Amino acid sequence: MTVTGMLSAIERIGRDPKSGGYYRPVMSTAELDLRTWFIGEAEARGLDVDTDRNGIIWAWWGAPRAGSVVTGSHLDSVPGGGAFDGPLGVAAALAAVDVLREREVQPARSLAIAVFPEEEGSRFGLACLGSRLLTGKITADHARALTDREGDTLADVFARGGIDPRRIGRDDEALGRIGRFIELHIEQGRGLIDLNEPIAIASSVLGHGRWRVRVTGQGNHAGTTLMRDRSDPVVAAAAMVGAVSALTREVDDARATVGRFEPFPGGTNVIASAVDFWLDARHLDDATTRALVARIAAACEEIAAAHGCAVTVSEESWSPTVDFDAGVARELGAALPSAPLLGTGAGHDAGILSEFVPSGMLFTRNPSGISHSPEEHAEDADANHSAVALADALQGMLR
Ligand code: GLV
Ligand code: MN
Ligand code: MN
C-alpha cells in the first residue's frame, strides 16, 4: 500500500473534527488504536512484531540481531498537531519494506521498524521518552514518577496500556541490536520549500530544553480585592512571558516559546493563587541556550518581586545540539545524491539515539512550512516518494 493510502486509513484517529488537529497522547485510545493499526500492517507484511518493556514496538524483517538497520518514528502527537509528524515516518517505513521486496532485495542484515512512545512529551512533559528509556538517558524511577495533566503517573498509565512499569528502563540488548538508525520525518519548517527539493538529509538538531515556571501569589476575590492589594500571579506570569519573547529576540537565532499556561484554580471571578507555564528554549550553541534561560530566570525573579509574588524555574528536560553521524550522512548522500543537507529546529528520537548508535534522518518537503498545527502538509507525490527515497537509503545499508 502507498504511504498516502496508509495515512488515509488512520486519518480519523484522534482528529478533532472542528479544528482538524490531532491529539494522540501516548497510551490514549487514539495512540493505542494507532499501535494496533501499525501491528496489523506489520503482521500483514509477515514482519515479527514485539512490543518491548519500554513500550517501543519493533517489527522485524529477519531475526533480531546486532548490526541491524532500524528505521521508524512515532505515532503520538502534540495537542492540535498535524497528520504527518511521526506517522509519515512510520508509514514510509512500512512502504519502504514493500519497495525493497518488489525489488527482490535479499537483506544481508535484519531490518526493523521501530515505533517510539511519547516522542512529543505531550502527556508526561518529557520529549523522546521511549528513546530516553531505551538508552538510559532517563532513569526508570524518574520516568515512573512523571505525571500527566490529570495527575496520573506514567507507571499507572503504562500499566493500563499493558506495559509493566516495573520493567521499564535502559535496555542494552535492544540498543545493541541497532547498527544504524534512520528516521524519516516531515520537514517542520521552510527549508525544503526554499531549496525546491522533495527530500533532505539531516545535518543537525538544535539543542533544546524545557523548563517549568511556577509563579505563586495570593488567591482572592475578583470583586472585593482592590487592585493595589493584589499579588496576582497571572499578571506577573503575563509579564514574564513578555520578557521571554523580548530577551530571546536579543539573541541571534535563539527561539523560545511559552505554549502552555495554566492559572490555578482557573476561575473568571477568582484571582489565581498560582500559575504554571512551560518554557521551551532552543539554540544551536548549548551555552547560549543556557545563558538565555539564566537571563529569563533572573527577569522572572525581578518581575515576581515587583508583583508581590514568588517564582521557581525548574528544568524538565535538556537535549544538547546533535550533529548527525558523518558516515551515515555520507551513506544517505550516496543513495540520494540530489538531496541537500538540512538542519532542523525540531527534536527527534534519532537525536537521542545518535549519542549511542550511528543515526541519520531524512526530511520530506512540507509545502505549508507549518508544523505542530493542522496546516502541516505533504503533497501525495512527496509522501509516496518518501518511501522510495527511504528504500534507496536502506538498500545500501542492508548489504
Ligand atoms: C518535537 O517536535 C519538538 O521539537 O519539540
Ligand atoms: Mn516528530
Ligand atoms: Mn513534533
Image (spheres, rainbow, N blue to C red):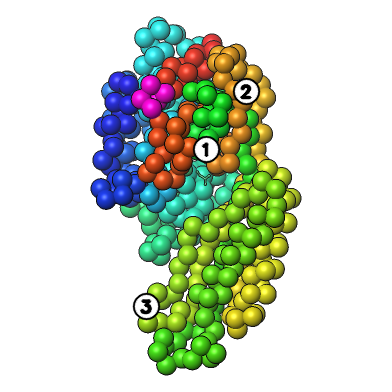
How far is mark 1 from mark 2, CA to CA?
Answer: 20 Å
Which residue has dot 3 on it?
268
Element type at mark 1:
loop
In this picture, residue 337 sits left or right of residue 38? right
- x and y, in percent, of residue 41 in the image: 30, 27
Amino acid found under the numbered disc labelled 1 = Gly
Among the two numbered marks 2 and 3 on one chain, the one whose residue lies closer to the N terminus: 3
Stretch of the chain drawn in magenta: 379-384
Among the two numbered marks 3 and 1 on one chain, the one whose residue lies closer to the N terminus: 1
Element type at mark 2:
helix
Determine the residue positioned at 45% across, 25% down: 112
- x and y, in percent, of residue 290 in the image: 70, 55
Label 3 neighbour load within 10 Å: few <14, some 14-19, many 20+: few
In this picture, residue 251 sits left or right of residue 360? right
Which residue has dot 1 on it?
189
Quadrant for the C terminus in the image: top right
The stretch drawn in magenta includes residue 381: yes
How far is mark 3 from mark 1, CA to CA?
Answer: 37 Å
Q: Main secondary structure of the magenta part?
A: helix
Determine the residue positioned at 41% across, 13% down: 100
Determine the residue positioned at 36% across, 9% down: 102
Asked whether mark 2 lies closer than 8 Å to ligand 2, one says no
Which residue has dot 2 on it?
329
Q: Is residue 3 above or below residue 259?
A: above
Q: Is residue 103 above or below residue 358?
A: above
Determine the residue positioned at 52% across, 22% down: 197
The quarter of the picture where residue 321 lies is top right
